[in-house]
Amino acid sequence: MTDPHVTRAQRRNAERAERNLAARSVPIQLADPEAARPRVATRTQLEVLQARGSIAIAQARAGSRIYADWYRSGSAPRVTANVSRLIGDPIIAAGPEAQFKARQAYEQAIQAVGVILSPVVVHVCLLDLPAGEWAKQVGKPEPDGIAALRLGLDALVGHYGNRATVELGQA
């Protein structure tokens, strides 16, 4: 049904506008409809490097272990308000002693890595940033970042020994 108050000229102009729009518009078909969606990274840098074969499984576990100690010590940056005390976060529920022990374990691990290699270990394991990016920041070629990371993770494997295989929540 048409509106009785619309003149013939108004109807003709609306029809012309629709035809012109249809003539100028070309539907775009993507080969893969999922390709238009943004990709969300769900793997850490350590997992990516281990999947590529750039680091060994023991090195990845040692890197995850230092991250767990760092996180349990309360050093991880807060993104939102800390309401974990209200809902019973197991990390907080363990008490300040557990947090203090985790802080000591983290500091001992960083000391075991040493002053020279600790920046790349912190950059990759704790901040979850690429090793090549660290190398560029310090003025070295990108492959040097992975090499330095391997050496730092080897020091962590030596420090943790078999303890690095303990799951993150059980340490």
Image (cartoon, rainbow, N blue to C red):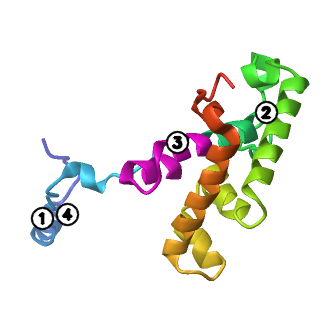
- For the residue pair 4 and 142, the one nearer the viewer reads as 142
- Cα distance, mark 4 to mark 1? 18 Å
Q: Is residue 52 magenta?
A: yes
- For the residue pair 70 and 106, the one nearer the viewer reads as 106
- Cα distance, mark 3 to mark 1? 61 Å
Q: Label 1 sits on what residue type?
A: Ala
- In primary-sequence order, the first of circles 4 and 3 is 4
Q: Label 2 sits on what residue type?
A: Asn
- In primary-sequence order, the first of circles 4 and 1 is 4
Q: What residue sits 69% from the left and 26% below the top?
A: 171
Q: Residues within 10 Å of mark 1 (few under 14, many from 20)?
A: few
- Cα distance, mark 4 to mark 2? 60 Å
- Cα distance, mark 3 to mark 2? 33 Å
Is 67 rendered above or below residue 137?
above
- Name the mark nearer the viewer: 3 or 2: 3
Q: Residues within 10 Å of mark 4 (few under 14, many from 20)?
A: few
**Cβ atoms at labels 4 and 2 below 8 Å apart:** no
Residue marked by disc 4? 10
Q: Horizontally, is 88 left or right of 16 in the view?
A: right
- Cα distance, mark 4 to mark 3? 75 Å
Assign a secondary structure to mark 4.
Answer: helix
Q: Can residue 85 be seen in this snapshot?
A: yes
Q: Position of residue 16 (x, y in %)?
A: 12, 68
**Cβ atoms at labels 4 and 3 below 8 Å apart:** no
Residue marked by disc 1? 22
Q: Horizontally, is 71 left or right of 97 in the view?
A: left
- Name the quadrant containing residue 117: bottom right
- Name the mark nearer the viewer: 4 or 1: 1
Stretch in magenta: 42-63
Residue marked by disc 2? 82
Residue marked by disc 3? 58
- In primary-sequence order, the first of circles 4 and 2 is 4
